[in-house]
Image: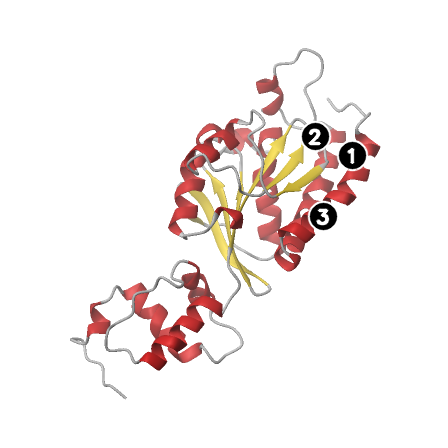
Amino acid sequence: MQDFSLSSPIFLYPLTVTTKLCSCVFAHNTTKLHLSLALAIASFRATAVLPAFFSDSLIATLRRCLCTATPPPWLFVGLGNPGDKYKGTRHNVGFEMIDAFAESHGIPMNTVHCKAIFGQGFVGEVPVFLAKPQTYMNLCGESAGPMAAYYKLPLDRVLVIHDDMNLPCGVLRLHDKGGHGSHNGLKSVIYHFRGNREFPRLRIGIGRPPGQMDPKAFLLQKFNLTARQRVDAAVEEGVDALNLLLWKGLTESARRFNKEQKYKHIRVQTLAVS
């Protein structure tokens, strides 16, 4: 076995890359990799450039480890506005969903990354990144776009969670793609995804404003008691939907979940929620 010194080529590699490679060598036969390694794999997969002195067999081992040790990660981005002023408002239900999901899995949201409050962890074997952009709603793509690029995630592994006035309050929908529906947050995300709309989203119904009320004022209002109860229940259902997505994949989870929500939609669509 080759002896390594501080002058060896491996020590000329960035420390994070060296750590990934060395950890992989010693851990690839275990059933689980350490969290830091598995999350590193998310951004250092099949494109890894390995030192020239590595043997072919070691390179093959590293490739297998880097590419197959864990399932591909997901990035969940909840849309909203930062600050206590907007907490509990209709426009911030995306933040609420992220917080509830993080709490249910013990994932701390205590880091700032790419202009977002950020957390990372595992759900079962799946690495998950969670983000709440702090750019304000209309600029949230400035966070979501760079974060997806940073982790080299295909957009079909980036799920955006947002409020939707076109659904009755408390009704949810899980889709694999779509337009922006005049939602300024989604417009920003699509723009920073270079116009690509083919990313999944979880829509959280908040209902439409009553009478002639200005939609902007409606979005920045807090929920009344009845609506609050419906949204709290919807957030719990949304967490279940995200868990199902990680377990069964997007297509199967959307089929199951949307069928359940269709009947819920029928029950509540004639009820007015102010």
10 Å neighbourhood of mark 3: few (<14), some, or many (≥20)? Answer: few
Q: Is residue 59 left or right of residue 72?
A: left
Q: Earlier in the sequence, mark 1 or mark 2?
A: 2
Whether residue 113 is visible, yes or no, is: no
Query: Identity of the amino acid at label 1?
Result: His
Label 1 near label 3: C-beta < 8 Å? no
Q: Say which of marks 3 and 1 sits in front.
A: 3
10 Å neighbourhood of mark 1: few (<14), some, or many (≥20)? Answer: many
Find residue 80 and report its horizontal and vertical position in percent. 53, 34
10 Å neighbourhood of mark 2: few (<14), some, or many (≥20)? Answer: some
Residue sticking out furthest to the bottom: 1
Label 2 near label 1: C-beta < 8 Å? yes
Q: Is residue 230 left or right of residue 63?
A: right
Query: Identity of the amino acid at label 2?
Result: Leu
Q: Which residue appears at 78% of the width and 34% of the height?
A: 265
Q: Earlier in the sequence, mark 3 or mark 2?
A: 2
Find residue 238 and report its horizontal and vertical position in percent. 67, 45
| Residue topped by disc 1 | 265
| Residue topped by disc 2 | 167
| Residue topped by disc 3 | 255
Whether residue 157 is visible, yes or no, is: yes
* Residue 18 against residue 266 in the figure, above or below: below
- What colour scheme governs how the chains and residues are painted in the rendered image of this protein? secondary structure
Q: Which residue appears at 56% of the width and 24% of the height?
A: 182
Secondary-structure class at tag 3: helix
Q: Which residue appears at 42% of the width and 41% of the height?
A: 145
Secondary-structure class at tag 1: helix
Q: Which residue appears at 58% of the width and 46% of the height?
A: 99
Q: CA distance from mark 3 to mark 1?
A: 15 Å
